[in-house]
Amino acid sequence: MENNENIEQIIEQTPNDMELGKEIRSRKNKFKEELELMNDKYIRLYSDFENFKKRKQSDIEKVKEDSILKCAEPIIEVYDDIKLSLVNIKDESVLDGINLILNKLKNGISKMGLEEISNDVYDPNIHDVISVLQPNSTDIIDVLSSGYKIGNQIVRYPKVILGKKQNNE
């Protein structure tokens, strides 16, 4: 008899299947909402972190580029001065030594990411015109100092003289 009484108590304490199903669905929906909320937070956090990494990488590149720009100008000036001094040197051994130094400087400039600006065709956005020998001329007849750039950023504009080129035909 005692077993029957225990079974009756268990039956009375156990909710019916319908109530149990509602409770399970309710908890399932609650957990699903919490999971979606956590997933949304995770996606936002991940996105913020990726944006942070990109900004930091961009900042690093900017600092690197600024550092190169600050170092480049004096090095380019020394390079130009050495090139100019070659004109007056007559001693072949000294000339060879200076050419060696000049080549090392040129390689160093190249390794910094600097590239010389082409002076084949005059471009008013790039070239700094020092003198025009003939009006309305757009031929570069002399380059007083080379220009340099890193990527699309100009470090130093080339200084040129414009005139009419002589046809040697």
Image: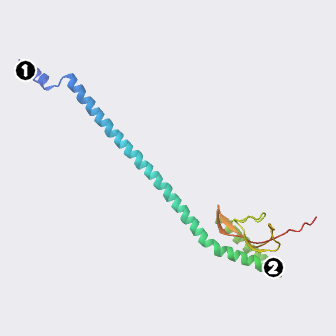
Helix, strand or loop under label 1: helix
Provide residue 140's location: percent of width, then percent of height: 80, 68
With 17 as the anchor, is 138 left or right in this view?
A: right
Q: Residue under circle 2?
A: 87
Where on the picture, by quarter, is residue 159? bottom right
Provide residue 28's location: percent of width, then percent of height: 29, 32
Provide residue 56's location: percent of width, then percent of height: 49, 59
Where on the picture, by quarter, is residue 146? bottom right
In the displayed structure, 76 sits above or below 91; it is: above
Amino acid identity at mark 1: Glu
Helix, strand or loop under label 2: helix
Task: Name the residue rendered at 73%, 77% in the picture.
Answer: 82
Task: Name the residue rendered at 58%, 65% in the picture.
Answer: 65
Of the 4 image quadrants, the one containing the C terminus is bottom right
Provide residue 1's location: percent of width, then percent of height: 5, 17
Task: Name the residue rendered at 64%, 73% in the picture.
Answer: 73
Q: Nearer the viewer, mark 2 or mark 1?
A: 2
Toward the viewer: 104 or 146? 146
Residue 68: numbered disc: none
Q: How is the image coloured?
A: rainbow
Mark sitting earlier along the chain (2/1): 1
Q: Residues within 10 Å of mark 2 (few under 14, many from 20)?
A: few
Amino acid identity at mark 2: Val
